[in-house]
Image: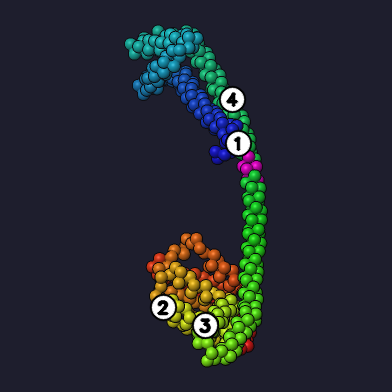
Amino acid sequence: MLTVIKRNPIIFPLACVAVVAMMGVSEASYWKSVNTLTDLAEVSAARTNVQNLAQSMLDAETGQRGYLLTNRKEYLQPYHKALKTIAESFHFLDDYYRKDPSSTIIVNKLHTLVDAKLSELSETMRLYDEGKMEAATQLVMSDIGKEKMEAVRQLTAELVVRETRNVAAGRHDIYETLWLSRVGVTVLSALSLFALFMYLRQSSALEREREAQRRMVQIERDRLELEVTQRTAQLTELADHLQTAREDERHRLARNLHDELGALLTSAKLDAARIRSRLAGTAPEALERLAHLVDTLNSSIALGRRIIEDLRPSTLSNLGLVSTLEILARDFSTNSGLTVQCDLQPVKLQPDAELVVYRLVQESTTNIIKYAQAKNVWISLQPKDGWVEVTVRDDGVGFDASVQPRSAYGLVGMRYRVEAEGGKFSLTSAPGQGTQIRVSLPESAALPAA
């Protein structure tokens, strides 16, 4: 919402103005209608009291005539009731027309005429009660009362007309208020719809922009993932190539050492043996020197063999993986003084995979000597559900596997060599709990030839 307001600052103020204006129009229309209806109620009450006044005058006159004709007191009840109604009507009209001078004049005239008429009616009944029938009849038959009643009817009719005009004006005010409220609500609704349209338009534009950004980010992410995948594949291929080149170089060097250096040392040993046979019994000191030379040549030949075995173990192709790992474990235990326990079973692996297993165990034992400070080492080679599982475990100091160690190139090399053969590499370690390297390689179709 804040983003929308910042991008289009007109929307929020426009919406606020529309809401406030709509509330203002609604409140103004409400209170104006309420006031108009209140005024109409008072107008209606005034017109009713005027009509009651006129009717009460007729009732009073009718009651007076009935009494005079029948001399029965019950005919005076409408008369007395009319007197009470006339008083109440005048009380309301005096208060109602107090602020209207022209209407006040009419009401005052009504007061005068009504009082005169009521006095006439009262005087007629007094004369009748005193037995002056002729005087009462003459007073009733005179036109004075008739003129007064006609004047009362005219004044009350004028007041009724005025109040009818007030009712019409009030109704007109209500209609006008409703019309203005209708127009105002329509206009404000249009403004609200416009504000909503602007908001939705801005929201749609923002959504399109965000969608475009998401697409760009997704494209960039896909590109980076593809590049990472390609680089990882290239690094894997490079590591495999380097390892292969390294093994090829070792193999070439081992072959040269075996063929050339071995031949030279063997030839030197044979020459020393011939010289020794010819000097037999003639020069004891020379024979002693010659014996020392033969011992040196034997040591050199043994050193060459060890170097050749380290570069390319001949036992791997001659005796198989299990025997080679047993020899490696025995030599490691002899050189390091650690206790090595082996659980090695025949497995089906290609020659390159066997070499990977050999190098893995060789690298692991080298790391154990350098860093583990262990006392016991366990080496396992087992077939398992179409896979060959190799495990090297120690009870050394261990390390935090979540922290990349500085000298982790050996482990990285192991991982790449295993993955290049289609296998899986895992390392488990914790401070004080030793280290375990577990490798799974797919089995080959048949055992390698011995």
Q: Mark 1 sits on what residue?
A: 7
Q: Residues within 10 Å of mark 1 (few under 14, many from 20)?
A: few
**Of marks 2 and 3, which one's residue comes earlier in the chain?**
3
**Of marks 4 and 1, which one's residue comes earlier in the chain?**
1
User: Callout 1, which amino acid?
Assistant: Arg
Residue at 58% over, 35% down: 6
Horizontal side of residue 337 vs 218, given as left or right: left
Residue at 39% over, 16% down: 91
Label annotation for residue 107: none
Magenta highlight on residue 204: yes
Residue 363 seen: yes
Q: Mark 4 sits on what residue?
A: 176
Magenta highlight on residue 268: no
* Element on which disc 4 rests: helix
Horizontal side of residue 224 vs 103, given as left or right: right
Nearer to us of marks 1 and 3 is 3
Whether label 4 touches label 2, CB < 8 Å: no
Residue range in magenta is: 202-208
* Element on which disc 2 rests: loop
Q: Residues within 10 Å of mark 2 (few under 14, many from 20)?
A: few
Q: Mark 3 sits on what residue?
A: 289
Rendered image quadrant of residue 197: top right
Question: x%, y% of residue 205?
Answer: 65, 42
What colouring does the structure picture have?
rainbow
- The residues tagged by marks 4 and 3 sit, at their Cα atoms, a distance apart of 139 Å
Figure check: 135 above or below 258: above
User: Callout 2, which amino acid?
Assistant: Gly
Looking at the figure, which quarter contains the C terminus? bottom right
Residue at 62% over, 67% down: 239
Nearer to us of marks 2 and 3 is 3
